[in-house]
């Protein structure tokens, strides 16, 4: 009789342990399922999130535009800009200084200006925006896309440059959407953007925006790095100094 009671107690303990194990498994499955649903939401939500208003960019008159460059390729001074579409200071340069630089030095053939991304410097959206700009360049509208991207900047890594919004920008500037989608979805310029970043680092660029001013004196190539969204008078000082050094 006592032996039967002991067996019953052991069986009850085994049943209790089994029930606890089952509850633990169910709890683990539930937590994993919730986590999977949350991750799925993070990936799916951007595709359904409202795009919001697309702001038109101010029109800037640029001369001798060729893809991501403007001005005379044979100009005595070349300025390479290293920029990030998510960088607020890069936007400040566009809004406050670039047009003055175009009017004062690029339009008259003194400066040849080339824009480069700086890889994924701030985040993944930086690379996506740069790809959109380069893909627009295939249709002769790099600078139009450049301007509208900056016009719609709202912060860093906050969803300002989701794929859907970049497509909306492309529609706004009236690109051929089939061609743009083919380029953008195919990541045609991913390698160029990575190369932009590497070249900038090799040139000594450490922040955005930065500008590499290059010129030649008696066969010797000289470079000056301007860092930050400098006002036009700083560019004037460096450009005029380079021209004087070249005897122009």
Image (spheres, rainbow, N blue to C red):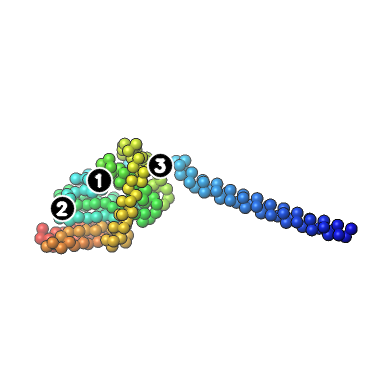
Give the residue number, with chain letter if any, for mark 2.
75
Would you say 63 lies left or right of 227 here?
A: left
Q: Is mark 3 on a helix, strand or loop?
A: helix
Residue occupying the far right of the picture: 1
* Neighbourhood count class around disc 2 (C-alpha, 10 Å): few under 14, some 14–19, many 20 upward: some
* Residue 151 seen from this side: no
Asked whether, in this view, residue 26 is left or right of residue 15, the answer is left
Q: Residue 101 carries which label?
A: none
Residue that extends furthest to the left in the rendered view of this protein = 247
Residue at coordinates 21% horizontally, 58% vertically from top-left?
A: 213
- From mark 1 to mark 3, how far is it between C-alphas? 23 Å
Q: Identify whether 146 is placed above or below 219.
A: above
Q: Quadrant of the N terminus?
A: bottom right
Residue drawn at the location 29% of the way across and 57% of the way down: 199
Percent x, y of residue 33: 58, 48
Instruction: Specify few, some or many for label 3: CA neighbours under 10 Å numbering under 14, 14-19, or 20 or more.
Output: some
Task: Please tell me which of labels 2 and 3 falls first in the chain.
Answer: 2
């Amino acid at each position: 009789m006592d032996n039967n009671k002991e067996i019953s107690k052991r069986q009850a303990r085994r049943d209790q342990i089994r029930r606890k194990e089952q509850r633990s498994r169910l709890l683990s499955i539930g937590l994993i399922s919730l986590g999977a649903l949350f991750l799925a939401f993070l990936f799916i939500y951007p595709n359904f999130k409202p795009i919001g208003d697309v702001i038109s960019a101010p029109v800037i008159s640029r001369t001798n535009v060729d893809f991501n460059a403007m001005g005379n390729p044979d100009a005595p001074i070349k300025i390479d800009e290293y920029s990030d579409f998510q960088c607020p200071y890069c936007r400040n340069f566009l809004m406050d200084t670039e047009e003055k630089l175009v009017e004062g030095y690029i339009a008259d053939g003194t400066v040849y200006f080339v824009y480069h991304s700086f890889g994924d410097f701030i985040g993944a959206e930086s690379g996506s925006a740069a790809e959109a700009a380069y893909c627009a360049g295939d249709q002769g509208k790099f600078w139009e896309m450049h301007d509208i991207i900056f016009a719609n900047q709202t912060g860093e890594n906050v969803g300002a440059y989701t794929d859907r919004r970049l497509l909306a920008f492309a529609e706004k500037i009236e690109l051929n959407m089939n061609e743009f989608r083919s380029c953008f979805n195919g990541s045609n310029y991913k390698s160029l953007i990575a190369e932009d970043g590497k070249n900038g680092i090799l040139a000594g660029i450490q922040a955005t925006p930065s500008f590499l001013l290059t010129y030649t004196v008696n066969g010797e190539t000289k470079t000056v790095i301007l860092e930050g969204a400098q006002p036009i008078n700083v560019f004037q000082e460096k450009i005029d100094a380079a021209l004087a050094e070249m005897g122009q």
